[in-house]
Image (tube, coloured by chain):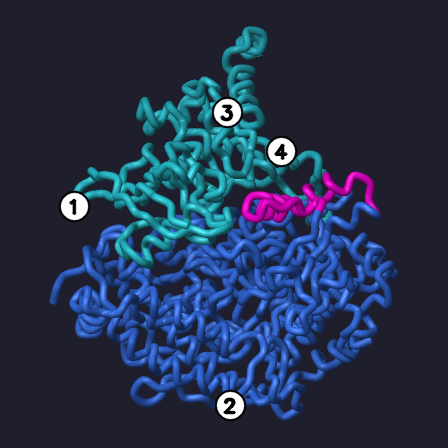
Chain colours: A cyan, B blue
Amino acid sequence: MKATFKIWRTHQGTTDGTFQTFHTEVSEGMVVLDAVHRIQAEEAPDLAVRWNCKAGKCGSCSAEINGKPRLMCMTRLSQVNLDEPVTVEPMRTFPPIKDLVTDVSWNFRVKKQIRKFKVKEKEADGTWRVKQRDIDRVQEFRKCIECFLCQDVCHVLRDHNKHEEFIGPRFLVYAANLEMNPLDTDDRVPDLKDQHGIGYCNITKCCTKVCPEHIHITDNAIIPLKERVVDRFYDPITRMFRIFK
Amino acid sequence: MATYATYNYDVLVIGAGGAGLRAAIEAANAGVSVGLICKSLLGKAHTVMAEGGMAAAMANNDDRDSWRVHFADTMRGGQYVNNWRMAELHAKEAPDRVRELEGWGAVFDRTPDGRINQRNFGGHRYPRLAHVGDRTGLELIRTLQDHAVYLGMTVHMEHTVIELILDNGRAAGCLAYDRERGRFHVFAAKAIVLATGGVGRAYKITSNSWEGTGDGHALAFRAGAELMDMEFIQFHPTGMVWPPSVRGILVTEGVRGEGGVLKNSEGRRFMFDDIPDNYKPQTASDPEEGWRYTQGDKSARRPPELLTRDHVARCINREVKAGRGSPHGGVFLDIAWIKEKIKDSETHIKRKLPSMYHQFKELADLDITREPMEIGPTTHYIMGGIRVDADTQESSIPGLFAAGECASGINGANRLGGNSLSDLIVFGKRAGEFASEFATKHGQARVDDGAVERAVKVSLEPFERGEAGENPYKVQADLQETMQALVGIVRQESEMRDAFERIQQLKSRAARVGVVGHREYHAGWHTCLDLRNLLTVAECITLSAIERKESRGGHFREDYPDKVAEFSTFNIVSRQGAGDSVQISHVPIPPIPDYLKEVIEEQKS
């Protein structure tokens, strides 16, 4: 059986592009990345696509499939309508490099701005004792594979280009993982308010919907962090206490 | 000469998986300047795919564990052709390396008393694998990555090294290209650490990501270093087999560690039918005892599903060949059955094996809490690699170090599950430490312009041939077919001779590959360059496998099905011969010191 794919191709030396149409053979169990690879091997060897593990574990092959942010390796062809052409295009929130590949280096720069993990002293026996129930939530955040689909879909970044003022859902999750780690001793609440722009998020939950790891980004990470900011800086009673301390 | 971007570092680390990152951290902490080159984006290396855990005798779950037991388990698993000094260092240092990760932010699963939880795994006598559900590799790489980026090293992402450059026999630097623009970059360094991972992409069915093209192996080989134990490849017993596009993707051994069982089409637990003598005293006598073991009963012995990977893979292969396989050419791995034993097994399985649940649900439409999985062997890991000094990880080329999968020694003929992640951090640290020491003691070597120009010229040839050249993907696919069919899990001389002939033909085809277009992010061109490396490792694997006329660990010969004592006294080494050939030789294994011999004896019962 053949299916039609419309794949975004950038024009040599520019950041513009157009869709190129390919008809390629598909079979049972294939994912979108398989189809892209077949096209690459048979028709367009210079087609640029970033991928790595092809098992949904590394978060490299993020793209927009029929307009939806998805991992190409985890999108089965049986989940998309093959009667219509399938469109595959790069994440639109990041600058294009070539075809399906975008420049995601901004994310790596942002991460460095977050205060790093600072561990507390060990117990007398030389270990750190932690209850499993106290790290369940942190472990949820640590499932993140850094595919940056949440950054791609976030309208603060995508539509309003607040890359300089807002770290985006991925790094709010990262900050939450550090803040809620029982072994961490640093404090990121002032930075979240002043440097990381947590106030820009108006909890539309778009990020949560696209997360391939099903992390409850908004409910479990962003809202609790917002509450910490509010408690610290805007709660009238706490503010009174601070004035008289 | 054309001008290229050039960089100077005290220590240059090539590869940013667990071993490379750990080496870079150690070097940065030693106060030298560090450059880190990775083929992918930072944090995407194949380490992320490791699932089960990292082995370290911390004795949190069973206080009978110690470095002695871990050492003996590793040697037994490796069939005693391991580098015993590496096995010793690994067993002794792994616990500290794991605890150090916790101090850097790793969040391991906990025991009821709040310590790092450890799980059972094949070939390990006691529960020994520190883990995070079934995504331990992700935890490892993310922890190292997030720690490393604050240490002031320079990371060159999506750069691939084309050639190492020596100066008077000493490592001096390398030539690389960046994927984004296809530009060439020259790196000069006082010491170089190779941490490039494995070679799985030489085979058709593999659990390895695209990066596993044997770059470090081949770079070192072409520079004149020795590769050792290349015949020893681990075929992991449980890879996915259906649907075809996911064939080979790993199914963690943790499934069996949590009580999963292997069955053939007749519903028989065939692993009870074939238990090697040297493992009999440690293996359960019936399914009930095996189940108790997986649930932490210290008086029980492990089920035969948790025998070493080489053995389990061959048993599966035998069942399939005998016509007792599953519909798509594998056997059944069943974890759903534990509903007979555990209330609310569905929640239990999802909590213990979240990413396996996810993987089968999304890729195969199968709910592992209700149905058995279909699985079969997949090319997973190469025990062989660059021959290094046990303590320093330095290769036979001064200033060139290697750690992790691209190095050899610790695993012998077969690696135990969980020993890889711990290998990365133990020997990654050592490589970083001794590379920075080397860099401190030695001045800058000279990167020869002529060598750079020659390497540039060779790498651009595919563009000169253009459309008239061969399709590189076709050559790569033919190589993968050849290795899969002729140098796979069960081997024999005539087939391997055939493979050798085919590799020679593939080499001449690889010299004729062509691509059109521009150099920016050009996957076809990258495949042309990868091919050279894949062919080099394929040839070393094939010739070493022909040379070892016995069966041991991951290397099984149908024409020599037994272990032969004589072959336990040496390792097989490949090095570059005249022209384009591979020269094979034997290097004797140094005698094991008495104190380690005693450890092995005391652990035999």
> Marks 3 and 1, how far apart in space?
43 Å
Which residue is under mark 2?
A: B586
Q: Are marks 4 and 1 on the same chain?
A: yes
- Chain of the residue where label 4 is placed in the rendered structure: A
Q: What is the residue that sits farthest to the bottom in this orientation?
A: B566
Amino acid marked by disc 4: Arg
Which residue is under mark 3?
A: A189
Q: Element under label 4?
A: helix
Image location (x, y in percent) of residue B275: 77, 74
- The answer to whether B294 appears left or right of B543 in the picture is right
Which callout, 2 or 3, points to the residue nearer the camera? 2
Crowd rating for badge 3 (residues with CA inside 10 Å; few <14, some 14–19, many 20+) = many
**Magenta-colored span:** B341-370
Q: What is the residue that sits farthest to the left in this orientation?
A: B1
Image location (x, y in percent) of residue A30: 47, 50
In the rendered image, which quarter is residue A176 located in? top right
> Marks 4 and 1, how far apart in space?
45 Å
In the rendered image, which quarter is residue B77 located in? bottom right
Q: Element under label 1?
A: loop
Amino acid marked by disc 1: Gly
Which residue is under mark 4?
A: A137
- The answer to whether B89 appears left or right of B225 in the picture is right
In the rendered image, which quarter is residue B595 located in? bottom right
Amino acid marked by disc 2: His
Foreground residue among A183 and A83: A83
Which residue is under mark 1?
A: A13
